[in-house]
Image: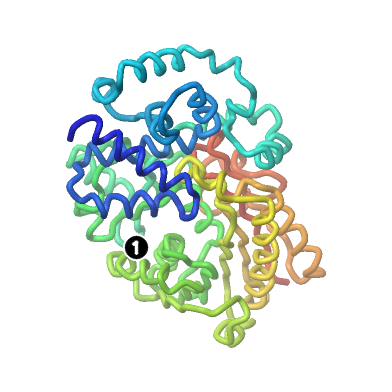
Amino acid sequence: MHPNALLELATELLHRVLQFKHPADGVVSDFFRQHKALGSRERHTLAETTYAVLRQRLLFQHLAQSGKGEMERRLAVLGWQGNEGFLRAALSEAEQQWLAQVQAVDRSALAEKLRHNLPDWLAEALQRELGDDFWPFVESMSAGAPLDLRVNTFKARRDEVKAALAQVGIEAEDTPYSPIGLRVHGKPALHKLEVFTRGDVEVQDEGSQLLALLLDAKRGEMVVDFCAGAGGKTLALGAAMRNTGRLYAFDTSGHRLAALKPRLARSGLSNVYPVQIAHERDERIKRLAGKIDRVLVDAPCSGLGTLRRNPDLKWRQTPQGIEELRAKQAAILASAARLLKPGGRLVYATCSLLREENEAIAEAFTVASQGSFTPLPAEQALAAARVDRSFELVRNGCLRLWPHRHATDGFFAALWQKT
């Protein structure tokens, strides 16, 4: 493809993404379906350029003001993640001179807002939460997330999977904390590998693996994954149960549950029962009240813990949206808690960084339960699940994961036992 044609495509893609009407990953996927002739390198350049702009949008918009022409083209030039010589071939002499001037700007001397590239409300919340750790967090957000795999322990062992990956030239190492995880270097085409197609592994961030381990699902139990989505944690729970008992995967989205079906087929599990519900007060939930041993509530949330993968979220979320989510989170947690039998375990989790969606919801639930639910220390539960250095993962009795500290997505989890 001619250099200028690829730059024009990057410009067009950014124009669509920066409207923020839909999640960026979906917009990028739709764009590639409309341009099927693109090669893998061209798709990589377009996608990575888009995500670079999303990560540093405020900085690039500031720098782009000194240029001329379409704003999205200038942003694409500033965020370009392809071959530099290819880019220069697409630029006019004036654009090359402008780019050289912009690249010479001392970015460390710019205003804080242009260095952290966060909306004001989010930057203020994270500065309160992190203190001196705020800037290390910002730096971690500029890097891509690693590729983590969860070994399907119903079918395989971690050392076996690692050896199988090595045989096809893929280097993998044990995840630092999860005893069932592997971290892969690079971005191999996993869906073509036998270890993937036969269900020995699933792609799952290490932090997400830890949430499933916290529930400590046992053989023969009745377990509910209350907000199952596409089922990543559901499959981890089913493997922990050794394909026994009964595991309900509840979700309001039939589309998300449909995405679980091929994964479930690969996994070899037959103890999983996907159920589409209308809302958290659905009659099918009420019929199970007081009968369930363990419930995982991976609640709908802002998703801000996944900013390395989904940088558009910081521009699409708002304080008003967070307040709406808080009401939903509290209602879902209260409804899910009714499922548990005495002695049962409840885990509330999010992939949010914000205290409002995490500790505040958990604390309010504990108070509202009036002693019918006793908080459990996360460190004890993690240690029982053979999680290495579990003390590093806990704050005030809850699981608290940060990208810059733990190399995972940002996660929170609180645990209770029904008395």
Residue 383 visible to an observer of this rendering: no
Colour scheme in use: rainbow
Identified at 26% across, 25% down, the residue is: 90
For badge 1, the amino acid type reads Phe
Residue 281 in the figure: left or right of residue 197: right
Identity of the residue furthest to the front in this view: 69
Whether residue 220 is situated above or below residue 202 in the rendered picture: below
Residue 281, percent across and down?
63, 80
- Residue placed most toward the observer, 168 or 274: 274
Q: Quadrant of residue 335?
A: bottom right
Q: Residues within 10 Å of mark 1 (few under 14, many from 20)?
A: some
Residue 313 visible to an observer of this rendering: yes
The quarter of the rendered structure image containing the N terminus is top left
Identified at 68% across, 58% down, the residue is: 376
Identified at 36% across, 66% down, the residue is: 259
Residue 122, percent across and down?
65, 41
Whether residue 354 is situated above or below residue 249 in the rendered picture: above
- Residue placed most toward the observer, 225 or 360: 360
Identified at 48% across, 48% down, the residue is: 19
Residue 307, percent across and down?
51, 43
The quarter of the rendered structure image containing the C terminus is bottom right
Q: Quadrant of residue 374?
A: bottom right
Residue 245 in the figure: left or right of residue 398: left
- Residue placed most toward the observer, 183 or 299: 299
Q: Give the mark count.
A: 1
- The local secondary structure at tag 1 comes to loop
Residue 29, percent across and down?
33, 52
Instruction: Report the residue marked by disc 1.
Output: 154
